[in-house]
Image: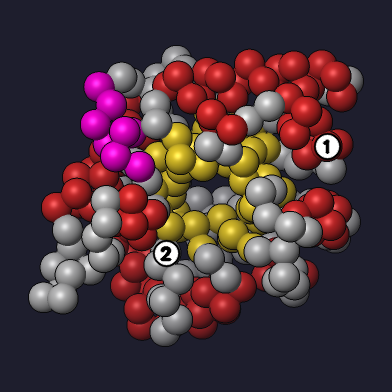
Amino acid sequence: MPINPKETMKPLLYLTSAEPLPAPDRLSAIRAIVVDATNAGAMQMLSAAAEKPDRSCGLFARIGPAEDLNEADLGPLLSSRIEGVVLAGCRGPADIQKTDVMLKVAEAAAGLEQGKTALLAEYASVPASVLSPHPLAGASPRLSALIFDASALAEACGLQRVTETGDVPAVVRLGRATAILRAREAAITAYEMFPADALDEWVVRRLWTNSLENGFSGAALRSAQQIELLAAAGVLAAGR
């Protein structure tokens, strides 16, 4: 069951700058769109997403890693009316705290209420976060969710997400458990990223069910096609 068994979250949808927004009737089934701010065309995509008719679907910018961040880059993002940021490659609470401070500076410069910008973190996607002994609880009041990406962790370790024998590498199992436990410890939401090659209705239904049964509160999707597959599988109506 999810970390909070009473609450299943709507999925997050990662979009590239080349992808169109989902149809309006699909936007209402999405918790938020995540646009990679490090890619070319990101600002144009963020501007287009900010004009979406359904305001119940949030808008997040993917930033980072923390060592590459500066306040000057965050200013234009906050001006694009994003609800929050997703920190890539988070290694632990120090990265979250650094990002929090930079957001405070950027919010002040933009005339925004301090703490208005939410923070999510891609966690256990690099070995440093899997091995970190430091809890995330109290790192930042902005921190509202962790996102686990098995493909990213496997790549960072020089492995495949699934072995030739059909097994899941031990480090991926450890990273997955770490993300769930750190989220539970901090009393925040945990999402699991679907693999990019999950393009079958039966597969996405199985992944969704498996994520919830293992403690995640929802999924992070890599394409609008996966949204359509979840809709066909009949699992998009639940959650918030």
Q: Nearer the viewer, mark 1 or mark 2?
A: 1
Instruction: Please state which of residues 183 and 94 is positioned toward the viewer in this rendering.
Output: 94
Dot 1: within a 10 Å radius of its alpha carbon, few (fewer than 14), some, or many (20 or more) residues?
A: few
Asked whether residue 25 appears in the rendered view, the answer is: no
Amino acid at circle 2: Phe
Residue segment shown in magenta: 126-133
Instruction: Give the residue at mark 2.
Output: 194
Q: Secondary structure at mark 1?
A: helix
Residue 14's x, y, as percent?
A: 59, 59
Looking at the image, residue 144 lies above or below residue 235: above
Residue under the image location 58 percent in, 38 percent down: 64
Looking at the image, residue 151 lies above or below residue 230: above
Asked whether residue 20 appears in the rendered view, the answer is: yes
Residue 190's x, y, as percent?
A: 41, 43
Looking at the image, residue 3 lies above or below residue 12: above
Main secondary structure of the magenta stretch: helix
How many numbered marks appear?
2
Rounded to the nearest angstrom, the CA distance separating label 1 from label 2 is 29 Å
Instruction: Give the residue at mark 1.
Output: 76
Residue 198's x, y, as percent?
A: 41, 76
- Asked if the residues shown at circle 1 and circle 2 are in contact, with their CB atoms under 8 angstroms apart, the answer is no
- Magenta stretch contains residue 32: no
Residue under the image location 24 percent in, 31 percent down: 131
